[in-house]
Image (cartoon, coloured by chain):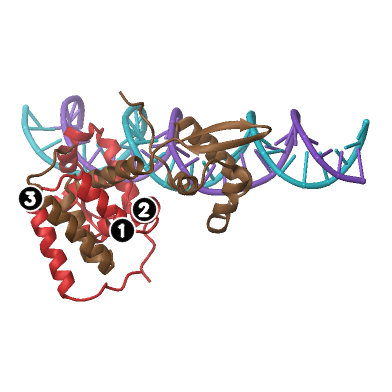
Chain colours: A red, B brown, C cyan, D purple
Amino acid sequence: MKRERPPPSDAEWKVLHALWRRHPANARELLDALGPETGWAYTTLKTVLSRMLEKGLVSAEMRGNTTWYEPAVEQGRARRNALQSLIERVFEGAAGPLLAHLVEHESLSPAERKQLAAWIAAAEKKGGRRGGR
Amino acid sequence: MKRERPPPSDAEWKVLHALWRRHPANARELLDALGPETGWAYTTLKTVLSRMLEKGLVSAEMRGNTTWYEPAVEQGRARRNALQSLIERVFEGAAGPLLAHLVEHESLSPAERKQLAAWIAAAEKKGGRRGGR
DNA sequence: CGCGACCTTCTACACATGTAGTAGGGTCGC
DNA sequence: GCGACCCTACTACATGTGTAGAAGGTCGCG
């Protein structure tokens, strides 16, 4: 059984993105990376990080007097969970309408469209639906 | 300028789904519709509803001593906002990876896949990307 | 007319989250 | 050795959310 990990909050997603991009990282580095868009105080980031540690979203290791952080969740997994949760919460479990919204409103680039078409074709070929939940 | 409407919370989405399905509705009807899955007490629902009223998510009209509720937001708009917000928060604004996740993990039914392919084709034909945000 | 059934509004409280201050300890230059 | 500087841990507080109890209005029935 996988440990039940609470989903990342807004602030935590920001930290995760920065961490996935570059890690390990200490608080100062993270703040430099996040500062511009968040305007957080150093201690704010530290608070967020400690909560993430409790949740198991990041792991920390102290070297000298500095704590080095690493993401403790995989980006793909985290995203998938978030997506799944959105589908349930907002789309009542039906992925179809979600796709409609995406295609109609989310302005895919031609490249993205093309790749998407390729995925579809691949899935098509590979046969039926894959077992869901 | 559209009034800034806070996004629905989890509980509020549930109420909205019920309301979109059937409205106007009073608290009792809503509770009957939601009760099974939520197990809410009557007053819990009422609290949620009054908060939704403040947020402008529903509108209410009192007839006799009963309040009748209607959704005050369009389902499509609400969903689009939620999706947009997810894309920003979780996917850093890139819809492409989201699609990848969908196609790879969300177990689309063959019908959904087919429809998606059709959309793609249509968009493809219709030429370039549509104007985004 | 009084009672029960049902409705409403108020009040409450715990937990999550955003945000940050304060205090205390290590390190390095001078 | 001392002060500047940087790091950490602890504490704090407002707001949003889930959840619900308590108290009080209304209306039909007997």
- The residue type indicated by label 2 comes to Phe
Q: Mark 2 Cα within 10 Å, few/some/many (few <14, many 20+)?
A: many
* Residue in view at x 35 percent, y 28 percent: B4
Which of the labelled discs sits on residue A91, or is there none?
2
Q: Secondary structure at mark 2?
A: helix
Q: Which quadrant is home to the N terminus of chain A?
A: bottom left
Q: Is residue B68 above or below residue A102?
A: above
The residue identified by callout 1 is A95
Q: Nearer the viewer, residue D7 or B84?
A: B84
Q: Secondary structure at mark 3?
A: helix
Residues indicated by labels 2 and 3 sit on the same polypeptide chain: yes
Q: Is residue A109 left or right of residue B106?
A: left
The subunit letter for the residue under badge 1 reads A
The subunit letter for the residue under badge 3 reads A
- The residue type indicated by label 1 comes to Ala
Q: Position of residue B29 (x, y in %)?
A: 60, 48
Q: CA distance from mark 2 to mark 3?
A: 26 Å
Q: Nearer the viewer, residue A36 or C9?
A: C9
Q: Tell which circle, 2 or 3, labels the residue nearer the N-terminal end.
A: 2
Q: CA distance from mark 1 to mark 2?
A: 7 Å
The subunit letter for the residue under badge 2 reads A
The residue identified by callout 3 is A110
Q: Position of residue A127 (x, y in %)?
A: 20, 76
Q: Is residue A111 visible?
A: yes
Q: Could you tell me if the residues under marks 1 and 2 are in contact, i.e. CB atoms within 8 Å? A: yes
Q: Which quadrant is home to the C terminus of chain A?
A: bottom left
Toward the bottom, the furthest residue is A127
Q: Mark 3 Cα within 10 Å, few/some/many (few <14, many 20+)?
A: some
Q: Nearer the viewer, residue B123 or A116?
A: B123
Q: Position of residue B24 (x, y in %)?
A: 54, 40
* Residue in view at x 21 percent, y 64 percent: B114
- The quadrant where residue A39 appears: top left
